[in-house]
């Protein structure tokens, strides 16, 4: 089955764009400057869209391929970007991301593509999965939601509103103890907690683990990310939880335009992509 999203625009591939940005440096300074100018022009040219149509196609093996001009989209690792048929909404979102690229290809507007590519390129291998989980567990000992200040009052209220319910949910759901800190010294969660929450994440499939990884890196919090991928937190709730300390500063000193607001929306986009990917996962009967 082939589904196509029609378009009349012409562009170039992100792979070609990546290649055009790397070359050997000329020997002389003048040649280097000339080459840099030439490459900048070439990069600008090759960032343009090359495909006319975007679509999805169900393959006999039960995978859904995303197509650009009837050619299968591939990950940076060269793997065909195919999605399990049970995750059809993900494939459609990825196709929509590529369809909505206009005159210039913008990688930051491909969050679903990025997570899916991460799952296919890097999280199918057992050893790599183990390394990724171990790395993400480092965020647990220094999790932002575990650092609780006793003043000012506005910060305490934000902590209580956005962090305490999450901590209570984690403790109840996974039967673990979450230690709260009042200092940046000697911050460590109980070994049993680290072992249990690491085991939980290790059982995620490649797509859910990729979504969890993206949520951890976006929020700088293992627990917020867990709340997102397990459906306890909405995207808006997760973004606010990740923004507590900044929001306290904004309430006191005011918002820095084009900085605080942009950062907050960027976090929302990345958390939203993670939540959407997980929301599409098959539900067990």
Image (tube, grey):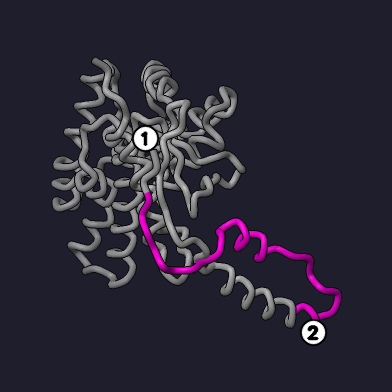
Residue at 43% from the left image edge and 27% from the top image edge: 62
Badge 2 crowding class, 10 Å Cα cut-off, few under 14, some 14 to 19, many 20 or more, is few
In the displayed structure, would residue 98 be above or below residue 223? below
Image coordinates for residue 278, horizontal then vertical, percent: 32, 34
Is residue 268 highlighted in magenta? no
Judged from this view, the residue extending furthest toward the right is 27
Residue tagged 1: 222
Judged from this view, the residue extending furthest toward the bottom is 30
* Secondary structure of residue under mark 1: helix
Badge 1 crowding class, 10 Å Cα cut-off, few under 14, some 14 to 19, many 20 or more, is many
Give whichever of 186, 93 is nearer the camera: 93
In the displayed structure, would residue 53 be above or below residue 276? below
- The reply, left or right, for residue 102 in relation to residue 73 is left
Quadrant in the rendering for residue 79: top right
Residue at 39% from the left image edge and 46% from the top image edge: 112
Residue at 52% from the left image edge and 45% from the top image edge: 72
Q: Which of marks 1 and 2 is in front?
A: 2
Image coordinates for residue 136, horizontal then vertical, percent: 46, 34
Image coordinates for residue 25, horizontal then vertical, percent: 79, 70
Residue 121 visible to an observer of this rendering? yes
Residue 187 visible to an observer of this rendering? no
Instruction: Find the magenta span and give its range.
Output: 4-32
Residue tagged 2: 30
Give whichever of 125, 88 is nearer the camera: 88
Is residue 7 highlighted in magenta? yes
- The reply, left or right, for residue 89 in relation to residue 35 is left
């Amino acid at each position: 089955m082939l589904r196509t999203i029609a378009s009349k625009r012409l562009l170039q591939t992100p792979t070609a764009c990546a290649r055009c940005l790397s070359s050997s440096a000329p020997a002389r300074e003048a040649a280097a400057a000339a080459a840099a100018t030439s490459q900048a022009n070439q990069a600008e040219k090759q960032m343009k869209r090359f495909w006319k149509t975007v679509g999805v196609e169900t393959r006999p093996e039960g995978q859904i391929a995303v197509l650009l001009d009837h050619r299968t989209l591939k990950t940076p690792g060269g793997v065909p970007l195919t999605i399990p048929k049970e995750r059809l909404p993900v494939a459609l979102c990825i196709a929509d991301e590529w369809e909505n690229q206009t005159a210039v290809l913008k990688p930051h507007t491909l969050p679903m593509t990025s997570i899916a590519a991460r799952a296919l390129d890097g999280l199918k291998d057992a050893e790599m999965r183990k390394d990724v989980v171990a790395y993400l567990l480092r965020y647990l000992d220094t999790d932002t939601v575990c650092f609780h200040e006793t003043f000012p009052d506005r910060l305490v209220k934000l902590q209580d509103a956005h962090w305490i319910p999450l901590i209570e949910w984690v403790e109840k759901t996974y039967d673990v103890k979450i230690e709260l800190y009042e200092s940046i010294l000697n911050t460590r969660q109980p070994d049993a907690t680290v072992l249990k929450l690491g085991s939980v994440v290790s059982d995620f499939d490649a797509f859910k683990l990729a979504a969890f990884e993206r949520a951890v890196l976006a929020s700088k919090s293992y627990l917020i990310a867990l709340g997102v991928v397990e459906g306890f937190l909405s995207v808006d709730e997760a973004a606010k939880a990740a923004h507590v300390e900044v929001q306290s500063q904004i309430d006191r000193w005011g918002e820095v335009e084009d900085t605080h607001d942009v950062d907050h929306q960027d976090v929302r986009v990345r958390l939203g992509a993670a939540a959407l990917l997980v929301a599409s996962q098959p539900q067990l009967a």
